[in-house]
Image (cartoon, grey):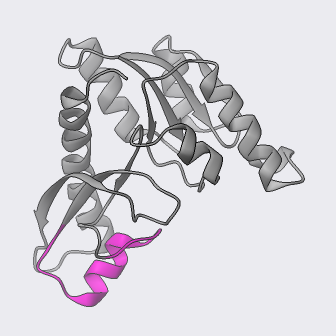
Amino acid sequence: MRIVVLVSGTGSNLQAVIDAVAEGLLDISLVAVGADRPGTFGIERSAAAGIETFVVDFKAFAERADWDAALLEKVLSYRPDYVVSSGFMRIVGPEFIETFPRRYLNTHPALLPAFPGAHGVRDALAYGVKVSGCTVMYADAGVDTGPIIAQRAVEVLDGDTEESLHERIKIAERDLLIETLRQLTPR
């Protein structure tokens, strides 16, 4: 099964997938890792692991539609069965979603549909929940609104800060992503 991963930052979920593949715990082919900006640690991690990398720099395009088209063209060049958004902080255009229906996966650090958006952990704490968690979903044209594939609960502890809760959620999120990828079949 051919996977392209998209990152914007450090790529901690990506590293868990790289490790699972290297340890024989996940039978997929990471054909490429792409970023929306140069200099991401996720790209450095991938290159160090011998995975092909690419950057489609959002700031290099005057029009959003041109960036969307360039990203889609680059991802398609790898013929992926699935594309995984792993901390990819850009919303892709409708053509990208339509090209990869139920093949573009996203992770989110909350139990959707509660607390969508960029601040799921902060919002969950502010609301006072006792249980938060993470979600793996098929991305759609909305913000964290796609069909849910899997979820994992994480207890909110007394005295949790956004950082402490988010670190525990990240651990659950890595495991859940790997389990989800194990259950997918090539398309």
Between 128 and 62, the one nearer to me in the picture: 62
Left or right: 60 in relation to 187:
right
Q: Answer above or below: position of 17 versus 93.
A: above
Instruction: Look at the image and tell me whether residue 8 can be seen.
Output: no
Q: Answer above or below: position of 154 versus 19.
A: below
Residue 155 spot, x, y in % from top left? 9, 68
At a point 60% along the width and 22% down the height, the residue shown is: 53
Instruction: Identify the magenta region.
Output: 115-132
Between 90 and 101, the one nearer to me in the picture: 101
Q: Answer above or below: position of 78 versus 123.
A: above
Quarter occupied by the C terminus: top left
Quarter occupied by the N terminus: top left
Residue 62 spot, x, y in % from top left? 90, 53
Q: Is residue 61 magenta?
A: no
Instruction: Look at the image and tell me whether residue 39 can be seen.
Output: yes
Q: Answer above or below: position of 22 versus 90.
A: above
Q: Is residue 119 magenta?
A: yes
